Amino acid sequence: MTWPSQPILETAAVYRARVRGCLLGGAVGDALGYPVEFATLDRIRGSHGERGVTGFVSGAQGVTGRISDDTQMSLFTVEALIQAHAREREKGIGGAWALLLRQAYERWLDTQSKPGPEQGGAPTGGLITEPWLYARRAPGNACLSGIAQLYAPDPWLELDGKPGQVNPDSKGCGTVMRSAPFGLVNPADAAFAMAARGAQITHGHPTGYYAAGALAAIVAHLVDGESLEGAVLRTLRLLARHPGHEETSAALEEALDLAAQGSPTAEKVETLGAGWVAEEALAIGVYCALAESRVRDALLLSVNHSGDSDSTGSICGNLLGALHGDVGLPHAWVQQVEGRSRIAALADDLAAETARR
C-alpha cells in the first residue's frame, strides 16, 4: 500500500486553519463535556441551571478546560501520522503507518500507568515527554485492554464487516473519538480505510471500526471544502460499499433527519442514544454540528445530555473545527483549553509535513 496522494487544498493557510480547528475544536468539545461525562441531563441541569453547562466547568483546584483520553489519543494518532508521512517522504516506505500507530498508542498507554515522563525524557522527544498528558481521565476499558494485546493492523486488510481479532464484540466510542486526524491528511476513501483498520487495534466490532472510518471520511470531505451535510451524504455512499455498514449508516441517517426538523434540544439529542457506543457518539456529534448554526451553541448542545458528553463534544468539535477552521471556534474557550499551545504546534507540524510530501 502506498501513501495516499495529498488532499486537495484551497490554500496552505486555509488547510492549516482546518487542521488546527479540527484538533483544537475536538479538545474544546472534550473539555466542555468531560466534567459531566457520567451525569444525567437532570443532574446537569440541577447543578448548572436549566441551560446546563454553558462553558468550562471548574475541576480540582479550580482548574478549567481539562481534556480527557479522547484528546490524548487523538494527539498520539497525529504523532503517528506525522512520523508515517516523514518515513514515506524520506525513505519511500509505504504501509509503515500501521506499526507507527500501534507504537503511538503504546506510548499513550504508558501515560496511563506512570506518574510522569521518565527522567531525562525519551531520546526522540515527542508527546511522551509532556507531563500534562500523564493524567488518567476515565480511559475506555477496550482501549486499555486492546492496546495491551499488541495487535498491529494489516495495512492491506480487507474491510469485510467481520469482527476483528481484538475485543471482537466491542463497538465503544473509543474508536471514533480518536480518528478525525486520518481525515486531515488523506482523501476520504483512504481516510476511511486507515481509520477503520486503526480502530481494530482496540475494538473489533464492525460498527465500531466503520464509525471511526466514517468520521475520518467526513473530516476529509470538509477539508476539501464540502459542506457538512454534503460530507455526511458522501460518506453514506462510501459506507454502503462495505458489508456490515447498516448500523453506522442508520445512525448517520437518523442524525440527518433529526437535524432537518430544526428546533434542536437536549431531549432530541437523547433520541440518538447516549454516545457510549461508536455509532451513537458519531450521530450525536453530527446532529449537533448540523442542527445549531452557531459553533458555540452546537458545542454546548453536544455535551448537555445523559451520556458520554466528552466524546460527543470532541466529535462535534472535530467537525466544526475542520469546517470553519480555528478562527471559527470560540476564542476564549480555545485560549483556556488544556495543552492549547502544544495542540496547535502539533497541528502545524502535521500540516507542514503533509505539504512537504
Image (spheres, helix red, strand yellow):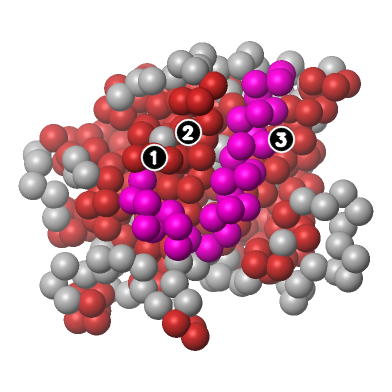
Q: Is residue 310 magenta?
A: no
Q: Nearer the viewer, mark 2 or mark 3?
A: 2
Disc 2 versus disc 3: distance between alpha carbons?
17 Å
* Image side of residue 335 versus residue 200, left or right: left
**Along the viewing direction, whichever of 170 and 226 lies nearer the viewer:** 226
| Residue shown at the point (82%, 27%) measured from the top left | 87
Q: Which residue is mark 3?
A: 82
- In what element is the residue under mark 2? helix
Q: Answer with mark 2 or mark 3, whichever residue precedes in sequence.
A: 2
Labelled pair 2, 3 in contact (Cβ < 8 Å): no
The label shown at residue 327 is 1
Q: Which residue is mark 2?
A: 17
- Kind of residue sitting beneath label 3: Ile
Q: Residue furthest bottom?
A: 61
- Kind of residue sitting beneath label 2: Ala
Point out the image quarter for the N terminus: top right
Residue 84 coordinates in the image, percent (x, y): 76, 31
* Image side of residue 234 versus residue 335, left or right: left
Residue 335 coordinates in the image, percent (x, y): 45, 57
